[in-house]
Amino acid sequence: MTKPKVLTFGKLEWADAGFLADFESKFDVHAIEPPSNRDGAIRAVAEAAKTAGPFDAAILLMGNSAYSPFDAPVFGPLAMNCRIVACVNAGFSEFDLDWFTANKMYVTNTLHAVAEPTADIAIFLILAVLRDTTREEMNVRKGGWKNASAPPRDPNGLTLGIIGMGRIGKVRIAETQRAKYKKHNSEKHVARKAKAFGLKIQYFNRSPVPAVEETALDATYCSKLDDLLATSDVISVNCPLSDATRDLIGVEEIAKMKDGVFLVNTGRGPIVNEKALIEGLRSGKITRAGLDVFDNEPNINPWFRSAENCVVLPHMGSWTDAAWKNAYHECMDNILAFFARGKPISPVNTLE
């Protein structure tokens, strides 16, 4: 029996050897070199489809932002046969889901692989902006010492407002996969980690989390974003990017925040309007910001590179060895589930 063909954007080198061997026993895997840009991706996919296709599935591996967005120009040559594209990302704003759905192709993301390390980075940034570590590190590197006249803030007793409590550690998966992913990922998320530092937790989400989880976290649900903005000392943006969340935080929202608020963004850059953010930082309305995500990555606004009241990271929330391995496994599990049962574990679009 002919094995289904899977096109991978790079090699599945982060997968466990046994996991990969089992996968390759069921599928004919064809790897192309990871494209360095969008034009390269368009050419590489067209060439692979012509010389090694047709392909029944595809896997997008780490580093795919270099050749996004993902749409007809990139995946058109695969559309005749390809039924599923599995992606290592948790977010999926880079996909033209209408096009994939119209062409009867599932798109899947990862539910758990990046949740834990991204939550870790959020906590790191919360502590860094409160304790002013970037400015103090600069002082030391320049030969100075700490700014003794202005001690930074202590997290204990402050109110943390979390925007988006649904993704990290709270998504149900197929029962057959649950034990495996629990082994790789604890069910912790930003709120659970923040509680250890004495932060009071409140959150805004499309709907409240289950009451048992609210009780465990001692978390308070804000049904209106404005209520969270007005009463939080630290605001952490964790929601995915969508049409509804693009520019969710702008000039009007920042004006509603407490004076001297601290802001952290590990969701996606465009969720926070960067022009409004810079103005808020310049005016002092926002004391400090911790950013792991930006508009137009990696060519970010140069203002952030030199701003002492910003802690900046190169979108590394998911950048750990364990996260990569688990993300590769989740992608492969989505492919396995689709060809075994007709539906993947974590589709982000719905096919009739």
Image: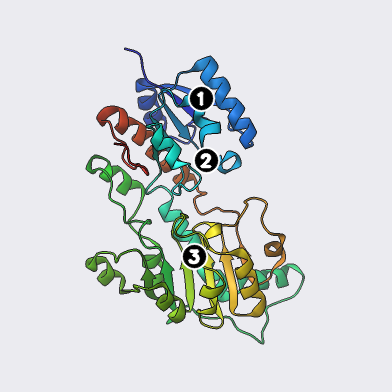
Q: Nearer the viewer, residue 286 or 200?
A: 286
Label 2: few (<14), some or many (≥20) within 10 Å?
Answer: some
The disc label shown at residue 248, or none: 3
Residue 73 screen position, x and y as percent: 55, 32
In this view, the mark in front (1 or 2): 1
Report the disc number at residue 77: 1
Vertical side of 204 occupied by 149: above or below: below
Tell me, yes or no, if residue 148 can be seen here: yes
Residue at the (30%, 64%) spot, across then down: 207
Q: Secondary structure at mark 3?
A: loop
Name the image quarter holding the C terminus: top left
Residue 197 visible from this viewpoint: no
Q: CA distance from mark 2 to mark 3?
A: 27 Å
Real-space Cα separation, disc 3 to disc 1, in angstroms: 36 Å
Q: Nearer the viewer, mark 2 or mark 3?
A: 3
User: Where is mark 2, residue-wise?
Assistant: 62
Cβ atoms under marks 3 and 1 closer than 8 Å: no
Q: Where is residue 351 drawn, in percent x and y?
A: 32, 37
Amino acid, disc 3: Leu
**Colour pattern:** rainbow
x, y percent for residue 345: 31, 40
**Rendered position, 68 above or below 263:** above
Q: Position of residue 147 (x, y in %)?
A: 68, 81
The amino acid type of the residue labelled 2 equals Met
